[in-house]
Each structure stands twice: as C-alpha cells, then as structure tokens.
Image: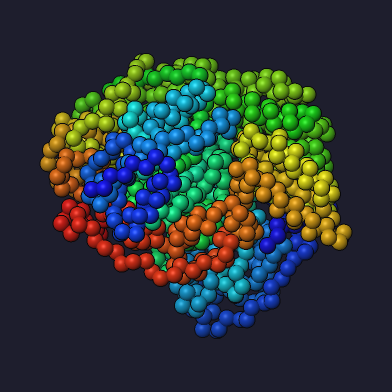
Amino acid sequence: MPPRTESQDRRAPPPHDLDEQKPGGTQAHFESPSKRLPAEVIARFCAAVGEENVIREPEDLRVYEADGLATYRVTPGVVLLPATSEEVSQVVKIARAAGLPIVARGAGTGLSGGAMPVAGCALIGLSRMKKFLEVDLRNAFVRVQPGVTNLDVSKHIAADGWYYAPDPSSQSVCTIGGNVAENSGGAHCLKYGFTVNHVLGVRMVLSDGEIVTIGGPTLDEPGYDLLGVVVGSEGLLGVVTEVVLRILRKPEATRTFFATFPSNEEAGNAVSAIIASGIVPAAIEMMDTLAIVAAKAATGVDWPEVGSALLMDVDGPLAECEHTSQRAIELARQCGAMEIRVPRDTAERELMWKGRKSAFAAVGRISRNYLVQDGVIPRKEIARVLKEISDLGTKYGLRVANVFHAGDGNLHPLVLFDARVPGEEKKAEEMSGDILRICIRYGGSITGEHGVGSDKSAYLGEMFSEPDLEAMAQVRCAFDPDNVLNPGKVFPTPRLCGDKPGIYKPHAAELSGQAERV
Amino acid sequence: MIELRPQTIEEARAQLSQLGREKKTCAFLGSGTKLMLGALPRTDAQLRTAGLARIVEYEPADQVVSFEAGIALAALQNALAKERQRLSLDPPFAAKATLGGIIAAASSGPRRMRYGAVRDLILGVSIVRSGGELARSGGKVVKNVAGFDLPKLVCGSLGTLGLIAAATIRVHPLPEAEASLIVRSLSSEQVPQLLDKIRAAQIEPAAMVASRTGPDRWDVAVLFEGFEAGVKQQEAKLRAVAPADRCDPWADHAALRERGELRLKISALPTALPQVESELFSRLPGARAAWYPTLGLGFVSMDAAPIAAELEFARRSFRVVVEAAPAGSTLDRWGPPPQSLRLQKAVKARLDPEGLLAPGSFVGGI
C-alpha cells in the first residue's frame, strides 16, 4: 500500500496544533461495503455493552472507516464501545464466536493505518474508557483506562507538579491506549524515552477473551518481559484495557533557544557538536527552509527564511540548565549559527514550540498535497541523508520539506505534490518509498514513531530478513494463535501459526520436585 | 556434557543447529557470575560465550554501541571511556559480568533510577534460536518502532529463548562531575518521606540506595551526576532538605549485591518499606539489606539459613525472588507465578518448540 496523502485545507487552521494533521483524503480508496451482521450477533453485542454502544448503521460505521491514514478506508462490520475490561472481554468472545476479525481503536490519530478496520470486523472503540482509576504520587504512578488522552494524564497531575513525559504531537487528542499500541514518542523522548519506558503494567484482553494483567506498579514481575513486547505491538497481541503509567516530577527549569543556520549541514553539525559535548537535550528539533516558510504561514512566528533552524530544550535542575543552554548556544555559534533567539517568557517559548509542532499541518499552506514520511537514520548521517533526499527531489521533480527530531535521527520528510497533475501522486509515493530505502541503507529504520500498520508492512520485509520476521511472528502466535487481532497489519506476508507447538514436557527437576510448575 | 566455545556467531549457529538435529538440550554461560539456584540447569551441552567478545560497531557520535554478547561489561566500559562515554548500567559483578549475562538476567543497579534498566537501554539484538536460525530485532538507532520489540523480550529470559549472540545498546556521555552524600539513621517510614522532600525540592539524583544499619535504621546514599554547576547546586539543595555528609558507599553496596550464600530480591511499592521491614528484614537476623527508594526494589544478603517460612510469610504481601542460594537448596526461587504464565509458556513453546534451551530453569518450570 502506498504512503498516505494529505490534501490542502485553506479554510481554517487545523483543529489541534498537531504536526500530524488528519489528512483530507482526496484520493480515498474505498472497499466495497461488507454485508450486514446477523441479527442474533448484534443482539449479543447489545446485551454485552448496551444497545446505544453498538454502532451498526452503514452511515454511522463510516465514521470509523479510517484512522489518520485517511486515504484508505474500510468499513467495519460493527463498532462496539465497551466501558470496562469485562465488557471488552465479552465483546471479544462474541466476535470470536461469530468469526469476526477484531480491531481496536483509540482516537484514530495514528498515521500508519494501525486502527484502520479490517473488512467486516468488530471494531472496538475505547473512547468511552477514559477513567482515572488510581493516582499515587508518592509511588509515582497513575492507573488509567486506555481512552484517556495523553495530555489529560499530565493535566490531571499538573497542579501537584507532576507530568507524563511522552509527548506525541497529537497529544491533545491521541489516547494512552493508542500510545501503548504504537509505542509513541514525541519531541522530548530523546532524554526521557518512549511510551515503553513509561508503562509499568497493563491489563489486557487476549484473543480468546481472557483478561490478563502484565506487570503493575511494582517492578520486575518474574517471567518474560511481555510488557516490553506488548507496548508497540500495534494491536496484534491483545486489547489493552488498563495502563499503569510512570509519572515524573516536573523539572526545576527549562531553557529553550532557537538558532538559524545557512544550511542543513551547519545545523546538523551543531546537533552533533551539542550531543558530543555531553549535553542530553530534552528535545532538539530541526526544520529546513520549506518547513520554516510553512510554519510562518500557519502560526505567524517571525522566523527568518533561512536554510535551516534548530529548536532546542534543556531541562532539569536550574544551575545545570543554565550551564548546558549556554554551552549549547556557544556550540551552535561555533558551528555557524547566524542568529540565536532565546524566548523572553513562557508565551514566547510556547509560540516557538507551536511553530514547530504545527509544521506538518502548515505544509498544507504551501502545497496542495503532501506525503508524511517517518524514517530513522544514525544521527551523524543527517547532513548526508538530507543531501540524498534533496537529490531524490531533483530526480523526481518534487519539493521536500524536512521537519524532524534531530537528536535521535528521526526524519519526517514531507514530499509535496499536486494530485491534479497526472502521475504526480504516484511519483511522490515512489519517492517516499525511496526515502525509506535510504534509511535502511544507512542502517536506520522505516519508522521511528508512526508504526508499520497497514502502510509500511511491505517495507518491513526490506528491513528484516525472513527468519527475523519469523521470530516476531511466533510471538504473535503465542498471543493470538488464530490471527484474529488486527489481521493483515505489520507483517508483509500473511502468516499462519501452523500447528500448536509441541506438548509441554516436564523437566527432570520438576519431576523430582526441585522445581515446580503451576 | 558437551562444552562448546564458539569463536564466531556463525560457529555458534552451526553448533546449535547440530544440537537441534540431535534434540540435545543446551544452556548458555557468560562469565558465570549468576550461577544461582536453578539458573544453570543440567543440560546435554553448555555453550560458553567467551569467544564472542568483539565490539562490532561503535559510533561515539551516535551514542550507540554494537557488540557480541560475550564481551565483559568492564571491557566495554574501557572502550567507551576512551570517548568519554559509558554504558549507564551498574549491575552487580560489574568487573566480571558479560553483557550477554547482564541482558539475560536483566541485571541492574542503583543508576536504574535515572537511566533505566537494560530493557530501557537495549536497542537491538541478534539471537540464535534453537536449531541455529539467526533472528534480528530492533536496530542500531535510538528510535525505532519497526516490528516487535524482541530485544526487550530477551531481557531477563535467562537463555530460555535463544542465545543472545549480539546486541546494540544506547550509551551516555560520562558525567563531568559527581557527588555522593549520605543521610543517616532514618526509620523505614522516614526513607520514603525523604524521597517526598527530594521531589518537592525538584532535586534529581541519579541514584539512591538505603542501607539497613540495624533494626528499622537506614542510611540513605544519594548520588548526583552531571555538570559541575548542577551537581554543586543539587548537593546544596539536598543539605537544605536533610543533614547530609559526603560519603562513598558504593563498594559496600556492590558487596551486598554480590556476596552472601543466600540473596533475595524484593519488589514492592516504594512506600511499602515499613511493611517490608516488619514482614521480612526484621525476621532475618544477621541479614544485610538495601532498598532502592524510587524503584521499590530491596536486596538481602545473608549466610545460609532455613528461611522457607519467612519467605512464605513475606510473599503474602510482596514479591520475593531468591537470587542465590546454596547448592541443594529447596527454596522456591520465583514464588507465585505471574498471572500471565499461560502466555509465558506459549512464548517459550513458540520460540523454542522442542524445549531445548535451558529447560526447567525459568519461572513456572519453563
């Protein structure tokens, strides 16, 4: 499946300051509507979650036919809106008995089609599950239902001086359940890590309806680190119905600066120099000329239209922040920074970040359509890879805007095109794929934070060998042997789990009573 | 017993392939620092990773290093130190332990408070599965969500899923300055209260360890790392919160983690220290104990003694794992199994269908 397209929207600024705007879907590809479910199946779903929480009319189902990758649409068979783990479990059992595939969905902001329905599936919408179940500041955790939004976690504990670190750009709408499925990152994960580093435990419903708890507020549950593989499993291993999140005390200080450079090369060198000096920035973001122009058009920031710009945060204890921000500014100057701006107050700082975070959506102001790409390269290769991407643009005759998390080498090239020009969309899709191949060639990854989903499964087979994928597929088989959860996503070719693995044989130590099996 | 000492990953693959064909069981061994109760089952073969000890790729600018898993942590740290970097892991047996062993045992130390455990730092892994197939997962960049995260799955798997042949891990700059302070003689109630104060003052230690000095008496060591200016300021702020002296308690703490015929690991909520004190520590005369106040992890080191009853009592309230016990001990190593045991067994059965890798040594008889 080719990458997503986004369409221009000149009517109004985007509803949220996302850098991951909901695409307009000019080129939507529809699947033929699936046949209606038998009345007795609907009746069972109604009994489980209440009639008002079973969506089955074709016009209502269309709301759920896509996620943030809106160019591809598939109509679900039915949408269920459960309120508890037990209801999710019942819904899964009913769907299984009716032979329906199951897809879970949070807010539908994902950009890889992970929450896109499978034809005729039971889509479990977790938007009603937005309770805070437990807040324990002394033990530094909260327990929430999956429909709570990312930003609401931080808001809920802000008055006490705490926050939740992962901050995807869609944080005001995206849900914790979706973050867990995608292992979401954000600008500040360079220092603080990704969702997986902040999830202490989950309660989840397995493919047979069993409710299982993995991990919890206490650390190091004996056994395999299933949590590590559940986070980021893109809805293939189970439906997460509760999440225990590690929360952090707010740092004493944050220092921000914005620096301009003649080109990406100097900016890339500044990033390398800052990191090499031992500074761990909270965030370090880079934008090229086109992205700067777009951000200016969208948010009114008064940035000069230079070759490249950096936006950087350091945070932590005050004295440390003062020291590291000064040192970083010196290094930026040494690497050829033309201008350094330090925000005078919080409002100015927030405007700078708004400029950065709205950059994706802002590109809609300078191009009729564009593709958002998400690839990762080793940090030191930034300048070389950007040059290669620019050469690709020349070859294909397309413009590319670059907005990215420079600290961890996570690129977001935006390939600009005009869908009205015959063949241009196809060229953009090919070029977008070539960008991923560059990332693979440099030893990077085809996705840093948006996920594989429906969108990139073909490229997963270019990044990993068949035996690599086979080991991953076996893990899926352990959780979902019948391949009913989000089938067809992530893996490049359909895989069956085959026969159940060999019968468990007790070990000699177990038989002799030295070890026991429970 | 067949002893295998592969010098290359290819050789290890050939050896495991042959063992697989012959349906022979195998266990993996690094430097042998964690040969605890049940950790090394009796198997047909034993594969030692000492010959797989190369640094495969090290890019200081990217702050990642790839290595073969038999490399010793100390050797890796030496190589990193030349570029003023380090792996921010401080597990027990840091002088001898291999990275493969540290990953397989999910071994961590006090700096886990700031930098996380192995699972938080590992980026990629290559495992040789039973049968000899090589499977890679993750990658060599710090941010990557392509495919399932098997690097985390193998952390703590004790060689039951495959030979951890090579891995890639994130490294950090060496801190410019550090300072260790100690706040003395707190009760088990006061230890979490000290942490409350530290958080209220927005002090950010890199590590904290409470050491038990007597019945319900604890000395709390606080480590600061970073740039000189920051460390100085934080030291001053801590002294404003509690009377604190400079100290160097880390060698003592390492000894507690490494020595003693009987060693236990406790996992509880950070504020549960008073309960752990009354329901376990106070019932083990002569035991030394330490507690990581933010992580809720406790460690006991003692001479061999019959403690089955104490263990059972404590396990009603919190988790206790026997990390080391004398040969022949019949103590239940893991305690009650996790609720996900069925899934755990399914993962094992899928990745090692013949059950050839370290059988019987893991949780729930896996």
Residue lying furthest bottom: A39
Judge whether residue B109 can be spotted in this image. Answer: no
Left or right, A400 with reference to B338: right
Left or right, A255 with reference to A141: right
Residue lying furthest left: B306
Residue at x 41% of width, y 71% of height: A499
Left or right, B127 with reference to A459: left
Residue at x 74% of width, y 31% of height: A265
Residue B96 drawn at (x, y percent): 33, 30
Tally of numbered tags: 0
Q: Is residue A9 above or below residue A307?
A: below
Residue at x 63% of width, y 31% of height: A313
Of the pair B91 and A259, the residue shown nearer to us: B91
Residue lying furthest right: A421
> Residue B179's image quarter?
top left
Of the pair A514 and B235, the residue shown nearer to us: A514
Left or right, B134 with reference to A336: left
Q: Is residue A502 above or below residue A450?
A: below
Question: In which quadrant is the C terminus of chain A drawn?
Answer: bottom left
Residue at x 15% of width, y 48% of height: B330
Residue A302 drawn at (x, y percent): 81, 33
Question: In which quadrant is the N terminus of chain A drawn?
Answer: bottom right
Q: How is the image coloured?
A: rainbow
> Residue B35's image quarter?
top left
Residue B240 drawn at (x, y percent): 43, 18
Judge whether residue A120 can be spotted in this image. Answer: yes
Residue A175 drawn at (x, y percent): 57, 53
